[in-house]
Image (tube, grey):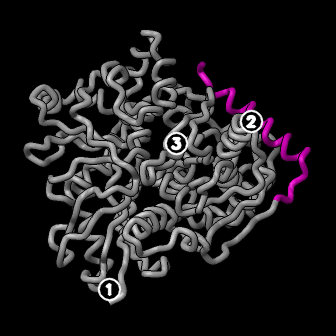
Amino acid sequence: MNPYILSIDQSTSCTKAMLFDQHGDFAGRFDLPHRQIIDDKGWVEHDPEEIWANLVAAVKNLLDKTGVSGDSVIGIGLSNQRETAVVWDKSRGHPLCNAIVWQCGRGREICGRINAQGKAGLVKRSTGINLSPYFSAAKIAWVLENVPAARQAHEAGTICCSTMDSWLIYKMTRGESIKTDCSNASRSQLMNISSLVWDDEICALFEIDPAALPEIRDSNDLFGYTDFDGVLPRAVPIRAVMGDSHGALYGQGCLLPGMIKATYGTGSSVMMNVGETPVFSEKLVTSLAWGIDGHAGYVLEGNLNYTGAVIKWLVDELGLLASSKDAEKLAREAREVDGLYLVPAFSGLGAPYWDDNARAMICGLDRACGKAEIVRAAEECIVYQITDILRLMKAAAGLDIQTLRVDGGPTRDGFLMQFQADMAGARVFVPSIEELSGMGVAYAAGISLGLYNPDEIFDRPAGTEYTPAMDEQRRDALYDGWLKAVRKTLTI
């Protein structure tokens, strides 16, 4: 039988199971969405048990759909939504509350208290990350303060606090393994970016016992064995784990300093590989790209809360679109309205503004504006936000950006991608395969198992390239208007 790598991409909206064959070619995918639990405060949660059940079901359905025998699966790769916090009792094996999703700003007050102590600089220096409720630490601290069962388990030493990867590894290995990889750990705001261990001083600021956190391992380490609750005929090794954006960076082949990619999903992550020495920036964060065979790679990163989620808002809340797929057609039909901008600060603004209290705004409407113009402004705000990050990265790293590699569902939108090329003033490369996060961890797992040759596996079929067509004067005028619109939303 031909061998396969089974890859799991557990994202914000759904859980995807994928197969990659012995040549690294995509061989099938099955998705299962999970509920987005949103209350009247705008707080966002997921049910960890639902996600685990969906993972098992997705794997079973994938094998049934493709006809691939479970005996052919030789290894597992896992990529996951990152800053989402899961808190569970490892003595009982069940969550103590719903997972707090990365979009949720309920840790704002906790970050405010730490900032009032004058410790925001310490957090940034130690973790590479600006103090913000976006990251896992404040979410975990909120759970410990507000969920009595979590406080009791914390005091009893039976609690585990982690990102989604550790919860799934725990479930996959029937409770035998509680581990995370260094890319996920770097997004928690609890790991020291230089020593690559949990930082005792930072943990104390958030009142989290480091013993409650998972063991940090290299991204291509052995994380345990799983048969997915009997779906596979035998247990196979979990040989790669990365945060979804890190998996996409790896899958894009951005292995050298200066290479850059943007993932378009519910939110967006823009990453630049800066090599084995961290580069620090006041307004961007420094994270681990991955740890491979004992060598750490670093990235500069900017994170955006609302990119694809803006289009979903037009569908679900405003009813302007029947489906996100309709956005491109309407955007192309819209008039150009100078000064029309949508700033999607629904739960504050992340990089590079770091204003948790900013709120969303549409400005520059005229009487003739209709839904097409609003849809176009929503598409354009995705590009403007990513352009914010690209310009900062260019300045921080001192590198010119010639090519931006992109991935995620919205990259199928030709209007969006052309506008991105125009505003970035760089070529935009869309790979032929959409599933970059899953592909990245599949490649890492396959290389670890000796199935793939690292010198050959990244040479994949060509995709689609968009080249800039806008003159520099027009580009600068549009971007200047965006900055003026953002300033109207800021509270700091």
* Left or right, 167 with reference to 447: left
Local SS, label 1? loop
- The front one of 116 and 480 is 116
Residue under the point 32% across and 58% down: 34
The spot of residue 137 in percent (x, y) is 36, 31
Name the residue type under label 2. Answer: Ala
Q: Is residue 37 visible?
A: no
The spot of residue 358 in percent (x, y) is 56, 28
Residue beneath label 2, please?
395
Neighbour tally class for label 2: few under 14, some 14-19, many 20 plus, Cα within 10 Å: few
**Residue positioned most to the front:** 294
Residue under the point 52% across and 55% down: 265
As for residue 474 lying within the magenta part, the answer is yes
- The front one of 231 and 323 is 231
Q: CA distance from mark 3 to mark 2?
A: 23 Å
**Sequence order check: which comes first, mark 1 or mark 2?**
1
From this view, report whether residue 381 is shown above or below residue 7.
above
Local SS, label 3? loop
Marking on residue 68 = 1
Q: Which quadrant of the figure contains the N terminus?
A: bottom left
Residue under the point 25% across and 82% down: 71
Residue beneath label 3, please?
305
- The front one of 362 and 114 is 114
Q: Is residue 4 visible?
A: yes
Name the residue type under label 3. Answer: Asn
**Sequence order check: which comes first, mark 3 or mark 2?**
3
Q: CA distance from mark 1 to mark 2?
A: 48 Å
Neighbour tally class for label 1: few under 14, some 14-19, many 20 plus, Cα within 10 Å: some
Image: magenta residue range: 468-492
The spot of residue 299 in percent (x, y) is 57, 43
Name the residue type under label 1. Answer: Val
**Residue positioned most to the top:** 117
